[in-house]
Structures are given as structure tokens and as C-alpha cells.
Image: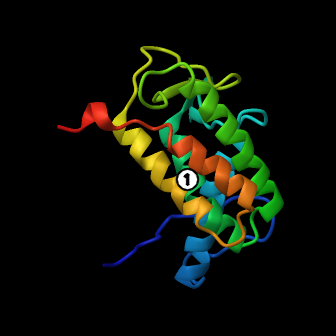
Amino acid sequence: GSLYLDDFALREAGPSIDTATAPIATVVERLANRQFNALWTARNKTTGIIPNTSDNATLGALNTTTGVVWTLPAAVRRGWVPQAEADAFMGQLVTSLNTNRNQTTYLPTRFLDLATAAPVTDREESSIDAAFIALALHNYKSQTATPVALRDSIDALQSRFDFSAFVR
């Protein structure tokens, strides 16, 4: 379909893009980079958990965290994040999700304390959110550049996901 960018301007540091004349691939690349960077820079530097919303910096969410994990391989390929930094983030996140999983019955909780990864609010264990993070973890560990030790730690975490209570 058509994409119209009338009355649209990208305002940011660095060179500007004229959305009326720039190639669509350039505009899309810039938008994708901005969206990824907004989430990436919002992550808790200790736990790796991403805030649920920009106006609540104390509550982390599995779904926003999944978005970063899912797109992280592409961010590395595009040069937005160095591989070593991505691997370090994933190591932090695996530790945090294990911490969370130590306090749950079947799966990581939908919402997590941003600083500790502990379950918060109603301690909901969402099979949908857990399935998406499991897929994102699988996507990351399947990269040839993923170190064996990190791949093994992701495997160990995924083996702790118990979907049996949600299957009939």
C-alpha cells in the first residue's frame, strides 16, 4: 500500500532527513533505529529489564523486554549495538529472568521489578508473554556469534519454562 509522510519531520541530533525526498528505506531505517534506541537506552543497566511504559520507570515488563531481545540480533547486524554489549545484556537478562522464575510457579511474570526482577503487582504468569520471550531467547541463542556459555545459560533458563499448566 501507499505510505504518506506529509507534514512529517524527523527532529533529532545529527543530519536531518527530508521525508518528502529521502528514499523510503532511509526513512524506515531511521525510524527503526530511533525506536530500538529508545527501548535500549531505557533498559535497567543491572537487570536488563525494559520499563513497561516511559512514564513508569519502576515497573518492568516482559513484553517490552521481549521486543528488545527479538530485535537485538538485527541491531547488532546494523551496527547499532556491539556484539559484546549485546551478549553482556543477554547474560544480565538471563540472570534476572532466573531470579524472577525462582519466585514463580510456572513461568516468568508479566511485570517485574525493574531493579530486582522480582514479581510485582498481581504476579501474573502470562503464557503468551512467556512464549514470546522464549521465542526471542531462541532467536538470540541461534546466532552463530552467540558464545557457547551464553547459549547454554539461555537453554537452561528456557528449560525452566513450564507451559504444561496452560495446555489442555
Q: Residue at x 68, y 59 (%)?
A: 11
Instruction: Provide residue 7's location: percent of width, then percent of height.
Output: 50, 64
Left/right placement of residue 85 relative to residue 66 reads right
The quarter in which the N terminus is drawn is bottom left
Q: Residue at x 54, y 79 (%)?
A: 20
Instruction: Provide residue 65's location: percent of width, then percent of height.
Output: 57, 43
* Quadrant position of residue 99: top right
Please say whether residue 3 is visible from this viewpoint. yes
Left/right placement of residue 26 relative to residue 164 reads right
Q: Is residue 90 above or below residue 139?
A: above
Amino acid beneath label 1: Leu
Judging from the image, what secondary structure is the residue with disc 1 in?
A: helix
Across the whole image, how many numbered discs are drawn on residues? 1
Q: Residue at x 72, y 61 (%)?
A: 148
Q: Which residue is mark 1?
A: 137
Q: Is residue 144 above or below residue 46?
A: below
